[in-house]
Image (tube, rainbow, N blue to C red):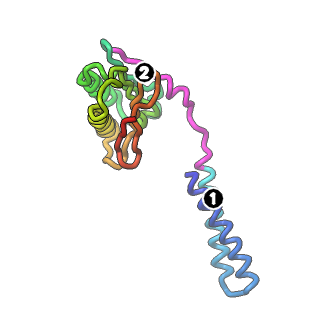
Amino acid sequence: MFVIGILGLVGFLVFAVLLIMSAIKKNGKTKKNLVALAVSFIVFIVGVATGSQPETDKQAKKDPVQSETKNKSVAKSNNKDEANYSKEQENNLIKTYNKIIDDSDGLITKIQQEDSYNIINVTLDDAFKSLNKTKKQELINDWGNKIENNTRAQLFATGIKDFKYVYFKDTKGNHLAKTGHLDRNWKVK
């Protein structure tokens, strides 16, 4: 919404100049420029008002409750009041995450969500770093697509246009792959 505010401000400035010029030239466009100036001002106010709403407590989103089963771990959100999905849907997704963890042969140690599953952090075991780059790329593409597609389908029932961010990190929190936000690809570092 911040972009709308900027567009409104730019429009306001442009039409203010045009209004002054049309008033000086008396070319009959004064009324149209005045209306456009008013509309731009309203767009600016709406953009600023919606863009300046206070953010929710980010610490609550980053302090998830851990669910441990053997050596696998999937984090759940504490802030269910923001969620648009049921507890059953979330539990089914966690089962899917646990299956992905099991199928990774110990390479995925944890799948943790932030921001009501808009961001999913995947922690990889240090053994992942010893694989060759081609194998790493294959695994990350496979895991990333499974995690993103299952999250979107099971919790939000949305199409492919509404994707979720999946980040692959090592045990120290360093990113192991660049996440493509527009083309849904990951590139191993």
Q: How many marks?
A: 2
Q: Quadrant of the C terminus?
A: top left
Residue 82 position in % (x across, y down): 46, 34
Residue 79 position in % (x across, y down): 47, 28
Is 188 part of what is drawn in magenta? Answer: no
Q: Is residue 101 left or right of residue 53?
A: left
User: Which element is circle 1 on?
Assistant: helix
Marking on residue 131: none
Which residue does the numbered mark 2 point to in the structure image? 171
Q: Nearer the viewer, residue 97 or 83?
A: 97
Residue 125 position in % (x across, y down): 35, 20
Type of residue at label 1? Phe
Which residue does the numbered mark 1 point to in the structure image? 44
Query: Which residue does the image show at 37% across and 20% down from the upper left?
Result: 126
Can residue 96 be seen in the rendering of this structure?
yes
Q: CA distance from mark 1 to mark 2?
A: 45 Å
Query: Which residue does the image show at 36% across and 24% down from the upper left?
Result: 124
Sequence-earlier tag: 1 or 2: 1
Q: Is residue 117 left or right of residue 63?
A: left
In the image, residue 188 sits, relative to residue 63, either above or below, namely below
In the image, residue 46 sits, relative to residue 75, either above or below, namely below
User: Which element is circle 2 on?
Assistant: loop
In the image, residue 3 sits, relative to residue 80, either above or below, namely below
Query: Which residue does the image show at 61% across and 56% down from the upper left?
Result: 5
Can residue 154 be seen in the rendering of this structure?
no
Q: Which residues are magenta?
A: 50-68
Q: Residues within 10 Å of mark 1 (few under 14, many from 20)?
A: many
Q: Nearer the viewer, residue 37 or 111?
A: 111
CB of mark 1 within 8 Å of CB of mark 2?
no
Query: Which residue does the image show at 68% across and 80% down from the upper left?
Result: 30
Q: Quadrant of residue 83?
A: top left
